[in-house]
Amino acid sequence: MRICLSILFFSISCSLFSQSDVKVVDSLFREDQFYLSISYNFIQKKPDNFSQYSFSTGFTGGFLRDMPISKNRHWSIALGAGYSYNNLKQNIEISTVSPNSSVSNSGIVRSRIILHYLELPLELRWRNASPSSHKFWRIHTGFKVSYLLDGNLKYESEILGDGNENIKDIVNRLQYGLYLSFGFNTWNPYMYYALNPIFDKNKTATVNEISSLNIGLKFYIL
């Protein structure tokens, strides 16, 4: 029995030692193919009597196909697809935006514009990664187009109480803008600047050119 236990212990020890000693190096490695970001939406080109409150959340997540273009794989391009959620908390009244709104003179105190997008990013990447380490510096910059999936305005009214109105018809179906993320390992500051307004100026009741600037953090998963 002792001999059997000794042989078993010796075999396990050898196995663990051999596993810990083996390092698999992938010379054709790809990096940062899944991403998540959380950011604050700063509204640009605000109309009169407009103010934000609380935390206007921006969230994105998706997949990017990393395609190295240099021999050491420090430079690459990436094309992907993902989902974007934006919750803009402000005091805008729907009747000042939508000409077909059933809500007017409603005494709105606070409202939230909630927008869902399918996003298509294209980016240029630099990183000093190596096959044996996943901790490295990176700079990623790109352009993305976002297609509107749904849009709603939820409001709190002193007269009507709480309500919800669909605003998909007056929001630009396509959003596009530039973005940048950079950092080391896990922590990567992230910025996105929209190049066109949220609302379609040909369908709003008044001129409304608000756009979004997102600042936050981006996380990459290999």
Image (cartoon, rainbow, N blue to C red):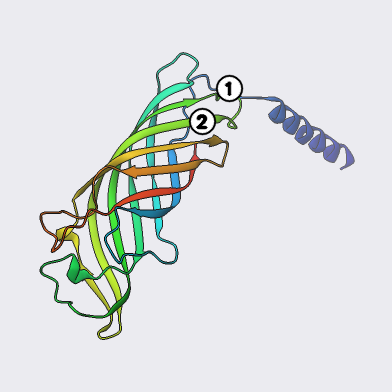
Asked which secondary structure carries label 2, the reply is strand
User: 78 left or right of 147?
Assistant: right
The residue to which callout 1 is attached is: 25
Q: CA distance from mark 2 to mark 1?
A: 20 Å
Query: Which label is found at residue 155?
Result: none
Quarter of the image where the N terminus is located: top right
Measured as percent of width and height from the top left, residue 147 is found at 23, 48
**Quick one: label 2 or label 1, which is nearer the N terminus?**
1
Question: Residue drawn 35% across and 43% down?
Answer: 193
Residue 55 or residue 48, whichever sits in front: 48
What amino acid is found at the position of numbered circle 1 in the picture? Answer: Val
The residue to which callout 2 is attached is: 138
Question: Residue drawn 58% across and 31% down?
Answer: 134
User: 107 left or right of 1?
Assistant: left
Measured as percent of width and height from the top left, residue 29 is found at 49, 25
When asked about the image quadrant of residue 57, the answer is bottom left
Asked which secondary structure carries label 1, the reply is loop
Question: Residue drawn 42% across and 37% down?
Answer: 180
Instruction: Report how many numbered discs are placed on residues in the image.
Output: 2
Residue 141 or residue 203, whichever sits in front: 203
Residue 71 or residue 13, whichever sits in front: 71
Vertical arrangement, residue 167 with respect to residue 149, above or below: below
Measured as percent of width and height from the top left, residue 165 is found at 21, 71
When asked about the image quadrant of residue 15, the answer is top right
